[in-house]
Each structure stands twice: as C-alpha cells, then as structure tokens.
Image: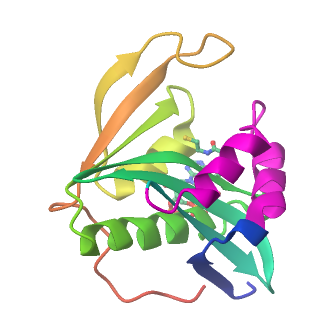
Amino acid sequence: MEIVEVEDATQDDLDAIYEVDRRAFEFPMSKASIERDLRDERLSKYFVARALGVVVGYIGLWCIYPEAHIISVAVDPDFQGRGIGKKLMETSLKWLKDAGFKHVFLEVRVDNTIAINLYKQFGFENVTVRKNYYQDGSDAFVMVCDLGKASNIDGEQKNE
Ligand SMILES: CC(C)(COP(=O)(O)OP(=O)(O)OC[C@H]1O[C@@H](n2cnc3c(N)ncnc32)[C@H](O)[C@@H]1OP(=O)(O)O)[C@@H](O)C(=O)NCCC(=O)NCCS
C-alpha cells in the first residue's frame, strides 16, 4: 500500500480532520470542538495519518497528567483495514508513555468490535459500562490502558 506517515496535527488540518470524522461516524464531532482542541495545545494533542500528503485518519487526545483520554480515533472509510488505526494508536500511546503519562482512558460503543479489537491489542481492558452514553442511546464500554504494561508500542515503527 501507499506509505502512510503519522504526524502531529496543526490547526491547518482542521477541515481535513472534520471531513474524516464526518465520513467515519454517524454522529461526528462538531467542527468547533475540533478547532478548540487544536488551539488548546496545553490540554489536547492530535495526530494525523497522511497518505501522499492527504489526511486519511486522525486521533485526538486530552492530556491531564498523569492520565490521558482518547477523544476519538477515525480512519477514512476508503482507507480502513490497512493498519492506519493501529499506527495512530501506536504513535499516540508511545508519545504519552514517553511524556510520562500513566493511564489512558476511552469510551467505545459496546458493539464496535473493530475498535474494541484494536484497543485490546494495545492492552486496553474494560472497566465499566456507561449506559445511554451516545446520542442514540447506545451504551459505551469504558476502557483503560496501563501504559507501564501496554503492548505493541515499544517496537520499531513499521512502514506499511
Ligand atoms: C476503528 C478504526 C479507527 C480502526 O482503524 P483501521 O485503520 O480500520 O484499523 P487497522 O487496519 O489498523 O486494524 C487494527 C485492528 O483493528 C481490528 N480490525 C480491523 N478491521 C477489522 C474487522 N473488519 N473486523 C474485526 N476487527 C478488525 C483488528 O484487531 C486489527 O488488527 P489486526 O489487523 O492485527 O487484526 C476504523 O475502523 C474507523 O475509523 N472506524 C470508524 C470510527 C470508529 O469507530 N472509531 C472508534 C471510535 S471509539
């Protein structure tokens, strides 16, 4: 496949991140909330995956030391299933670990098997269920990763 680079996102990536989010989710984030996150470098950190310079995926984090939260991760539907989600997770978990963060939390729809499989590969475990968490009434698993024990983040970066 084409070479995909994962890089720090900048405010110039706002429209592209929003477009990926809109294409990947039934209920996307608002552009205003992504814009706010990209501006707030103290609290938030976003990475983008680029294929030939075009943004095809992103991951957004909130970082409140010593804990971090994955706000969202998404890959453009035309590029899913090619290892890009894994690369975004690997890069962000390594970045958080190197920065000294201890735990990473996230919420995921209980029926989102693909995402749950992805998170489990990195050592995320279910901690609880949040009832009616999503706009359509679906429940969410809350998952946590202990970065001291996380899997798959200390290897060499692979080009796929
Ligand atoms: C979830 C998402 C980010 C994964 O990104 P991706 O690039 O498609 O995933 P990858 O190709 O990197 O695959 C990573 C892992 O996900 C799981 N996975 C991927 N496709 C899968 C499928 N069709 N069925 C089951 N598991 C699957 C596997 O564990 C896979 O690892 P493996 O290849 O070693 O088996 C992407 O599918 C997406 O954007 N989905 C819509 C938005 C979303 O649900 N985001 C998560 C919100 S919590």
Residue 32, above or below 40: above
Left/right of residue 65 with respect to residue 51 in the rendered view: left
Colour basis: rainbow
Q: Residue 158: x, y in percent?
A: 49, 87
Q: How many marks?
A: 0
Q: Within the magenta stretch, is there residue 21?
A: yes
Q: Do we see residue 78 in this rendering?
A: no
State which quadrant residue 155 falls in. Answer: bottom left
| Residue plotted at (71% across, 60% down) | 80
Give yes or no for residue 111 being in the magenta stretch.
no
Residue 15 appearing in the image: yes
In the image: residue 67, left or right of residue 160: left
Q: Position of residue 25 (x, y in %)?
A: 75, 39
Residue 110 x, y percent position in the rendering? 50, 25
Residue placed furthest toward the left: 148
Q: Which quadrant holds residue 142?
A: top left
Nearest the viewer among 7 and 126 is 7
Toward which corner of the image does residue 136 lie, by quadrant?
top right
Depth check: give the residue in front, 96 or 121. Answer: 96
Residue at screen point 57% across, 58% down: 59
In this view, the residue in front, 110 or 133, is: 133
Q: Quadrant of the C terminus?
A: bottom right
- 144 sits to left or right of 118: left
Q: Position of residue 113 (x, y in %)?
A: 53, 38
> Is 45 or 132 nearer to us in this picture?
45
* Residue in the picture at 55% in, 55% down: 60
Name the chief secondary structure element in magenta.
Answer: helix
- On screen, residue 84 versus residue 62, left or right, reads right
Q: Which residues are magenta?
A: 13-42
The quadrant of the rendering that contains the N terminus is bottom right
